Image (tube, rainbow, N blue to C red):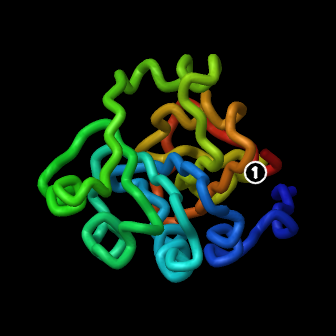
Amino acid sequence: MPYDYSSQVITAAEAAAMIKDNDTIKISFACSGPTAFLKALKERAHELHNVGIRHGRLNYPPEFLFHRYPEYWDHVEYRGAGCTIPFKDAQLAGKVNNAPMRYSEVPHLMKCGDVVYDALVFQVTPPDENGYCSFGLQASSFPETRNYVPLVIAEMNANAPRTGGDKVHVSE
């Protein structure tokens, strides 16, 4: 019998509404970015102040990249580990906050409190018959670090491939 997770499902807008002023959000990146969440966050970004988004390489469509649009710079700041061309204007305006670190050290830095996130947002596959979701193409540090963050939002993507390795139960 499939695991019933219907009581845990919320909309992207409801998830974005959980973000508060001064929050720092770690999101999945590359082709596994939580695009529905980012779109919903962008729709309410002007209500927010000093929200930071940290992620790695971006393969998102430009409409999801807050740092490309000056009207968002006082609301949502890119806080990354490096800068590439899409960040140039925001960085020159002082609206990018880079904190280089070794990616492999992120779980340790979070565990000891040197790096703090208020929310973790990542993509997963829909659950299998036992209620487990795959992290798809980008498990990253999410399996390890989700226990150190007060708010964890998993965006289900039916098009994400189910991969081996770490998985998360939908009850989590």
Residue at image mark 1: 170
Placement of 29 over or under 63, stated as above or below: above
What residue sits 82% from the left and 49% below the top? Answer: 171
- In the rendering, at what x and y percent does residue 36 appear? 51, 72
What residue sits 49% from the left and 61% below the top? Answer: 34
- In the rendering, at what x and y percent does residue 164 appear? 52, 35
Q: Nearer the viewer, residue 129 or 80?
A: 80
Identity, as a three-letter code, of the amino acid under mark 1: Val
- In the rendering, at what x and y percent does residue 87 appear? 21, 56
Q: Nearer the viewer, residue 55 or 158?
A: 55
Classify residue 2 by image quadrant: bottom right
On screen, residue 160 versus residue 10, left or right, reads: left
- In the rendering, at what x and y percent does residue 108 appear? 55, 17
SS at circle 1: loop
Q: Quadrant of the C terminus?
A: top right
Classify residue 101 by image quadrant: top left
On screen, residue 118 versus residue 49, left or right, reads: right
Residue at the limit of the structure toward the bottom, as seen here: 43
Q: Nearer the viewer, residue 151 or 61?
A: 151
Q: How many marks?
A: 1
Placement of 54 over or under 125, stated as above or below: above
Placement of 120 over or under 9, stated as above or below: above
On screen, residue 145 versus residue 101, left or right, reads: right
What residue sits 43% from the left and 47% below the top? Answer: 54
